[in-house]
Image (spheres, rainbow, N blue to C red):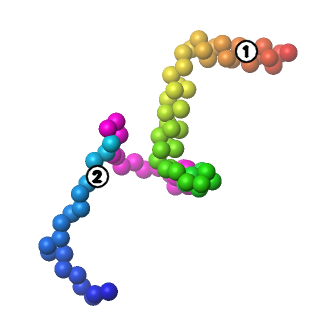
Amino acid sequence: MKKEYDFSHGKRGPVVPAPPGKVRLTIRLDAEILDWFWNKVNEQGGGNYQTMINEALRAHIQQQDKTLEETLRRVIREELRAQG
């Protein structure tokens, strides 16, 4: 390895554009959140932790979008079952 390198003629590498429907962003997440997703990817034998985070966020949004009627019906069914 050289002691010094000359980067005066260097060029920045190309920025890979995001696929359609995707947005490149910088986000700060807690280390334990990333660790959990990285561990899940490893347990499954590979994959993409970013895809898993995206799927988890999508599932959360879909859960939040359920109508009040659906939620009330679910709660009433659970209560009726619990009463026996």
- Cα separation, mark 1 vs mark 2, equals 50 Å
> Looking at the picture, how far across and down is residue 16, in whole percent?
28, 52
Q: Is residue 16 visible?
A: yes
Residue at 69% across, 17% down? 75
Q: Main secondary structure of the magenta part?
A: loop
Q: Is residue 17 left or right of residue 61?
A: left
Is residue 27 covered in magenta?
Answer: yes
Along the viewing direction, whichever of 80 and 62 lies nearer the viewer: 62
Residue 67, image quadrant: top right
Q: Residue at x 32, y 38 (%)?
A: 20
Q: Left or right of 8: which side holds 17?
A: right
- Residue 16 shows which numbered tag? 2
Question: Considering only order in the chain, which callout, 2 or 1, is on the residue closer to the N terminus?
Answer: 2
Q: From where the camera sits, is residue 32 visible? A: no
Q: Which residues are magenta?
A: 20-37
Q: Residue at x 18, y 66 (%)?
A: 11
Q: Residues within 10 Å of mark 1 (few under 14, many from 20)?
A: few
- Check the image and report above or below for 36 versus 78: below
Q: Quadrant of the N terminus?
A: bottom left
- Kindly identify which numbered label has been placed on residue 77: 1
Image mark for residue 2 = none
**Discs 1, 2 touching: Cβ within 8 Å:** no
- Residue 57 place in picture, x, y as percent: 49, 36
Q: In the rendered image of this protein, does residue 33 appear above or below residue 1?
A: above
Residue 10 at x, y percent in the picture: 18, 70
Q: At 21% across and 63% down in the image, what residue appears?
A: 12
Question: Mark 2 is on which residue type?
Answer: Val
Placement of 78 over or under 18, stated as above or below: above
Q: Residues within 10 Å of mark 2 (few under 14, many from 20)?
A: few
Q: Quadrant of the C terminus?
A: top right
